[in-house]
Amino acid sequence: MPASERTLERLPAEAGTLSERAANLIEQDILAGRLAPGSRLGIVDLVQRYDIGATPLREGLSRLMSRGLIVGIGQRGFRVAEVSREDLADITCMRTAVEIEAVRLAIRHGDLAWEAGIVSALHQMRRHIERTGNEFREGAAEFDRLHKGFHTALLAACGSRRMLAAHSDLYDQAYRYRRVMMGAIDSGEGFIRSHQMLADHVLARDVTAAQKMLAAHLHSTIDFVYPPESGEQP
Amino acid sequence: MPASERTLERLPAEAGTLSERAANLIEQDILAGRLAPGSRLGIVDLVQRYDIGATPLREGLSRLMSRGLIVGIGQRGFRVAEVSREDLADITCMRTAVEIEAVRLAIRHGDLAWEAGIVSALHQMRRHIERTGNEFREGAAEFDRLHKGFHTALLAACGSRRMLAAHSDLYDQAYRYRRVMMGAIDSGEGFIRSHQMLADHVLARDVTAAQKMLAAHLHSTIDFVYPPESGEQP
DNA sequence: CCTTGCTCTTATTTCGAATATATGATCATG
DNA sequence: CATGATCATATATTCGAAATAAGAGCAAGG
């Protein structure tokens, strides 16, 4: 195992045009929290930070705008989108709408390969938690990739490009909030169990149970990040 | 009626930055069919067409990309998104998901102002049809504004910014297909009646009936544009 | 005759400079 | 002392030209 270092970090950012690269880099930094919510995204700063010209940067920012990670005001530049309880509620609302319907369609149309994908994704997630023990928050980025993979697998057979794209976008937007609660998961025990149950309902083709559990799962993030009794802290 | 010409055409396009203006202009042209599906959007052509520089144009194109009206391939420029039966089905799928949930929430949370908005929007649409008679396809753009207004009014009280935005985007994307079937509506008679029924169900707070009718309404576009027995014609 | 590799053309993409706009400070004024 | 106008500075935005990549046409070789 000498040359085991492969080009892993080149995958997301080093493709195509500088505009895409810029969009990817900025998205990564926002999701990872390196660009805090509400931060001003001054062009000059960004040019220095990423060593990319103003034109492709602006283009990347424009693309991110429509995805809810960035807000841009007329002649006053761009900012990282704020986080707030209302926004998380809105994301959850939209996610619920998309996933409730997508999982219904997936259950209706899913074939054997789809089922296998779910089992596989769940297995990977479980193993990752077992392997890293209670410190699986450390590799939050890697863990979240698997978590996203599982939820994507559930919906994979829904047959709608737009729904899958929307799910992906919304998942990423919610990631900024989930990051906060990563440390709050005591053990991976209950986490895996609830996902196992979700998978069971889906594989049993029980639409109603799956929808119900999915909705509850989505809403649980809100209470984790903003406990019901506490005040707001945007 | 001397100075009855107000600045109406300035509303959508003449605000803020050139990038926004470019995005708006291109969007209008795509929706109106002046830029045909699949057209190459060469930068040089667009610069001449709109008398706007390459930088803000490209930025506008980037913004439209995430909204499904434009596809951009790496180093190979931009094109107007193709139309196809699959794409219309996908739009409808996504619209169903969003609207089914949004109307549920709206019925649950809607207040008196919301109800009034629905009645008002329906009234405007009916009057417009009565006034223009069977030629209401002529003012398709104006009519469609009212039609969109009605459907937006139904969901207005859902309480989710993202859902309303998604509805607006999807409605616009579907407009390219609806434009084709505009001439196919024999009389405004049945059209208004079905919308009246939809409004009745919603105002009666009958979630199930409203959802059912809404879904059917959305799906009806597919059969109009691509009749079930005919082959595809993208 | 088809394939392959090269050059030349065309178009996209990017940069650096110029322009237009907002922001903040300074100063005069009520 | 508060308030509003004016100017200076910083910033975002846009332009025109240069760098870069894709595509077309053509020649040489299998």
Image: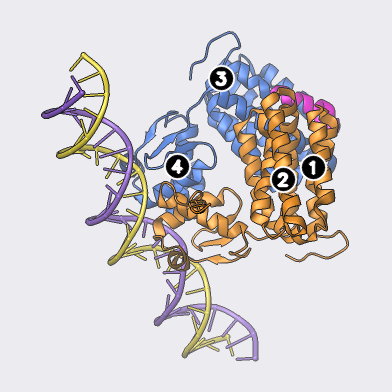
Chain colours: A orange, B blue, C yellow, D purple
Closest to the observer, C26 or B172: B172
A219 falls in the magenta region: no
Disc 1 + disc 2, Cβ < 8 Å:
yes
Write down the chain letter for disc 2: A
Spot occupied by residue A206 in the image (x, y as percentages of width and height) = 83, 28
Whether pointer 3 and pointer 1 mark residues with C-beta atoms closer than 8 Å, the reply is no
- B73 w.r.t. B226: above or below: below
Question: Residues in magenta?
Answer: B202-217
Task: Give the distance between the C-alpha atoms of the residues marked 4 and 2, in whole angstroms.
Answer: 47 Å
* Secondary structure of residue under mark 1: helix
Q: Earlier in the sequence, mark 4 or mark 3?
A: 4
Image mark 1: chain: A
Between the residue at mark 4 and the residue at mark 1, the CA separation in whole angstroms equals 47 Å
Mark drawn on residue B181? 3
The chain to which mark 3 is attached is B
Q: Which residue is mark 1?
A: A195
Q: Nearer the viewer, residue A215 or A32?
A: A32
Q: Is residue B46 visible?
A: yes
Q: Report the predominant secondary structure element of the magenta stretch.
A: helix
Which numbered marker is on residue A125? 2
Q: Which residue corresponds to the image point at 59% horizontal and 61% vertical from the top-left?
A: A80
Q: Are marks 4 and 3 in contact (CB under 8 Å)?
A: no
Q: Which mark is residue A7?
A: none
Are tags 4 and 3 found on a single chain?
A: yes
Mark 4 secondary-structure assignment: helix
Q: Does label 1 lie on the same chain as label 4? A: no
Tell me which chain the residue with mark 4 is part of: B
Query: Any magenta on residue B216?
Result: yes
